[in-house]
Image: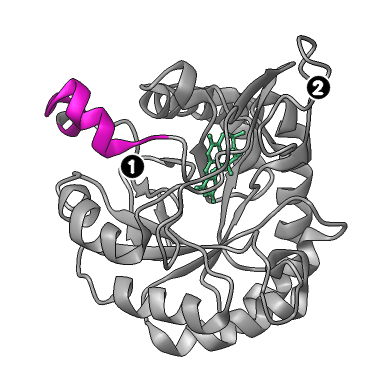
Amino acid sequence: MPEICGIELDHPVINASGTYDAIAAQAVFGDAVLADFPFSAFVSKTITPEPRAGNAPRRIWETPSGMLNSIGLPNKGLEGFLAEDLPKLRELPVPLIVSIMATTREDFAHCVERIARRREVAAIELNVSCPNVHSGLIVGENPSETEALLEVLRPVTEKPLIVKLTPNVADAAAVAAGGERGGADAISLINTLKGTAVDPATGGPALGNGYGGLSGPAVRPVALEQVRSVRAAVSLPIVGMGGISNGADAAEFLALGASIVAVGTENFRDPRAGARVAAELESTLRLERSATLALDLD
Ligand SMILES: Cc1cc2nc3c(=O)[nH]c(=O)nc-3n(C[C@H](O)[C@H](O)[C@H](O)COP(=O)(O)O)c2cc1C
């Protein structure tokens, strides 16, 4: 049975943070969503200490084989999440992973402490694509910032801490190694790649924020290479993601050393993508196993 950090999963496909709103899905489609949930664990949208409104529109722009977003992490803030969303998310039939981001180590620690106290939370994902306001450095772009953050958070909880890496770095493996030294339990990657586009109708930026993050099939080769290089550098389990839209894509991540995978942008096209990718992956792996067996018998 697949697992991540000791959390047993029915299959190896979870959602990528911010790409599937389980609460909205249940509100629209009813309890059928719970009866046949597409993912084997649910990762929340990233929560910040205080509420955020998100970026100015336009927030989404389609690109060749991908999508730019500059959503800007709109969320209810830590207390709003605990009071309003967590009671709904605890009804999900799968383990819950809560994604958090903060701009100081103290705020990160406060969020970890408040969230880890809740029994319904199986693990915490640390979105480190954010600046440390004290140093001005983007935490996940810097191995020693990442290590120092983990050193502060590690004593706060025994629950698994998953570091979600940004791909906007020269050496993702060095940052992953910083996370491992600091005491992380797993690495997930990749987050979106920085990108922008011009709106042909105006000649100005297509996104309200001026730039955004690229995701979808276009980023898959970048994600695969980062998974390969991180696998070579650390012994932690890896959650692989970036442009997965079918079982064959997912199999590539597993072949390069990911323990499980996450589906993101594809959820916008097909809200059942998680279950479909899991079923396709199962038959891809079965075919590979029979091919290996046939070769062994030759
Ligand atoms: C609309 C949108 C919102 C996202 N929000 C978050 C977020 O809140 N936290 C986070 O860590 N990643 C967020 N991501 C990044 C995804 O979790 C994922 O890392 C990335 O999109 C790559 O996977 P994909 O190509 O399968 O989408 C978001 C991506 C998209 C497209």
Magenta-colored segment: predominant secondary structure? helix
Please state which of residues 80 and 222 is positioned toward the viewer in this rendering: 80
Q: Which mark is residue 198?
A: 2
Q: Earlier in the sequence, mark 2 or mark 1?
A: 1
Would you say 80 lies left or right of 238 here? left
Queried whether the magenta region covers residue 25, the answer comes back as yes
**Is 100 drawn above or below residue 67 in the view shown?**
below
Residue 188 x/y as whole percent: 58, 55
Dot 1: element: loop
Give the quarter of the image for residue 199. Answer: top right
The verdict on label 2 being within 8 Å of ligand 1 is: no
Residue pictured at 54% horizontal, 22% vertical = 246
Would you say 146 lies left or right of 158 here? right
Which residues fall within the magenta stretch? 20-34
| Cα separation between marks 2 and 1 | 38 Å
Q: Nearer the viewer, mark 2 or mark 1?
A: 2
**Is 104 drawn above or below residue 257 in the view shown?**
below
Dot 2: element: loop
**Which amino acid, mark 1?**
Ser
Q: Please give the count of numbered marks on the rendered protein.
A: 2
Residue pictured at 33% horizontal, 49% vertical = 9
> For ligand 1, which image quadrant applies?
top right
Say which residue label 1 marks. 40
Please state which of residues 21 and 185 is positioned toward the viewer in this rendering: 21
Q: Residue furthest right?
A: 170
Residue pictured at 31% horizontal, 70% vertical = 115
Give the quarter of the image for residue 176. Answer: bottom right
**Which amino acid, mark 2?**
Val
Would you say 111 lies left or right of 213 here? left
Q: Residues within 10 Å of mark 2 (few under 14, many from 20)?
A: some
Q: Residue furthest top?
A: 201
